[in-house]
Image (spheres, rainbow, N blue to C red):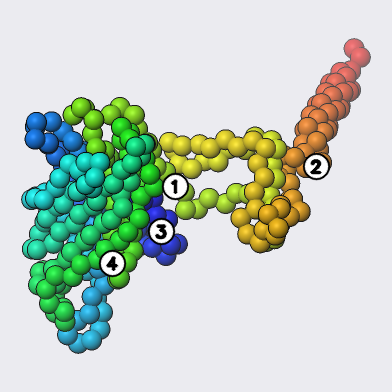
């Protein structure tokens, strides 16, 4: 599953739904064996679906489709150098979901997700105008991962297509398992939809030679050095005028100066208070 960024509105919706217990779904675990009865593909994840459908009165409703406690994985196959690995799960009243993995000599990736929901399931789709199964196909859903590495993604990620939002979280998967043993090498995926860094005017580049730390989430930090980027309005394959970060700017030297001045002022203030206190103490005594 690709680490697809949620639009701001959807991200807020997912946050609110999470606070209301929305993500209390069943986990899927698939352990596919080959002809020798050793593991060739392992996957564990959680998912949920938000579906917008038309009713008989021509208005639209939003349905929430959860996994049930009984999930089958008929049709799942190991895959090979010439055939994609395939994970297929079936749940509820005629609903199914599948994902295909391909590989080359170095990497594997998820290339196709197929989701079929059945509007005949009146418990989920009451008064649906369209009856029967509806299939959604999403392509190119995952960046390549090194072979013999486990892909792990704990944060919530989503795919949107044709009035359907597929939501995934707590993903652990490895297709094309070698020698029947799940790898201990892990590729982690993390994102931050509210990150605000590297600000520059449109048409300018951003530069920062000093070290910067980006807090992606509680598990991941990114440290950058000698950074120079420009994502938009690049002309003639050259950087535009650079806007420097504060750490590189000439104003940066003012910080220790300001701290030193503040400490000096504090020392003077303490000394003056001490002198005034001593004078008051002396005037308080009288000769006998």
Task: Look at mark 4 in the image and give the residue it sits on.
Answer: 164
Horizontally, residue 201 falls left or right of residue 283, namely: left
Mark with earlier residue (3, 2) = 3
Distance CA(mark 3)–CA(mark 2): 37 Å
Kindly indicate whether the residue at mark 1 contacts the one at mark 4 (C-beta within 8 angstroms).
Answer: no
- In the image, residue 41 sits, relative to residue 278, either above or below, namely below
Task: Look at mark 2 in the image and give the residue it sits on.
Answer: 251
Which percent across, then down, holds residue 281? Answer: 84, 21
Instruction: Decide: few, some or many residues near mark 1? Use Cα within 10 Å; few <14, some 14-19, many ≥20.
Output: some
Residue at figure coordinates x 17%, y 66% from the top left: 117
Q: Secondary structure at mark 3?
A: loop
Mark with earlier residue (1, 3) = 3
- In the image, residue 56 sits, relative to residue 181, either above or below, namely below
Kindly indicate whether the residue at mark 1 contacts the one at mark 2 (C-beta within 8 angstroms).
Answer: no
Which percent across, then down, holds residue 243? Answer: 74, 50
Distance CA(mark 3)–CA(mark 4): 13 Å
Q: Residue furthest top?
A: 288
Mark with earlier residue (2, 1) = 1
Q: Secondary structure at mark 1?
A: loop
Q: Secondary structure at mark 4?
A: strand
Q: Looking at the image, is mark 4 or mark 2 nearer the viewer?
A: 4
């Amino acid at each position: 599953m690709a680490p697809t960024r949620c639009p701001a509105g959807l991200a807020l919706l997912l946050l609110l739904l999470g606070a209301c217990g929305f993500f209390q779904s069943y986990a899927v675990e698939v352990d596919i064996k080959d002809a020798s009865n050793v593991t060739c593909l392992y996957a564990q994840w959680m998912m949920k679906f938000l579906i917008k459908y038309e009713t008989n009165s021509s208005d639209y409703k939003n349905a929430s489709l959860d996994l049930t406690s009984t999930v089958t994985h008929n049709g799942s196959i190991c895959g090979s150098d010439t055939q994609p690995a395939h994970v297929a799960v079936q749940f509820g009243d005629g609903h199914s979901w599948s994902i295909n993995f391909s590989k080359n000599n170095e990497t594997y990736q998820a290339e196709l997700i197929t989701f079929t929901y059945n509007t005949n399931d009146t418990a989920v789709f009451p008064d649906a105008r369209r009856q029967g199964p509806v299939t959604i196909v999403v392509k190119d859903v995952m960046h390549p991962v090194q072979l013999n590495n486990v892909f792990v993604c704990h944060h919530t990620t989503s795919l949107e297509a044709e009035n359907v939002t597929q939501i995934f979280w707590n993903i652990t998967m490895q297709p094309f398992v070698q020698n029947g043993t799940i790898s201990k090498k892990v590729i982690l995926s993390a994102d931050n939809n509210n990150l605000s860094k590297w600000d520059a005017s449109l048409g300018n580049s951003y530069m920062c030679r000093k070290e910067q730390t980006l807090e992606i989430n509680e598990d991941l930090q990114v440290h950058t050095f000698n950074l120079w980027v420009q994502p938009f309005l690049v002309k003639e394959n050259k950087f535009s005028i650079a806007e420097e970060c504060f750490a590189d700017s000439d104003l940066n030297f003012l910080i220790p100066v300001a701290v030193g001045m503040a400490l000096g002022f504090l020392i003077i203030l303490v000394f003056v208070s001490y002198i005034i206190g001593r004078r008051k103490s002396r005037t308080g005594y009288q000769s006998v």
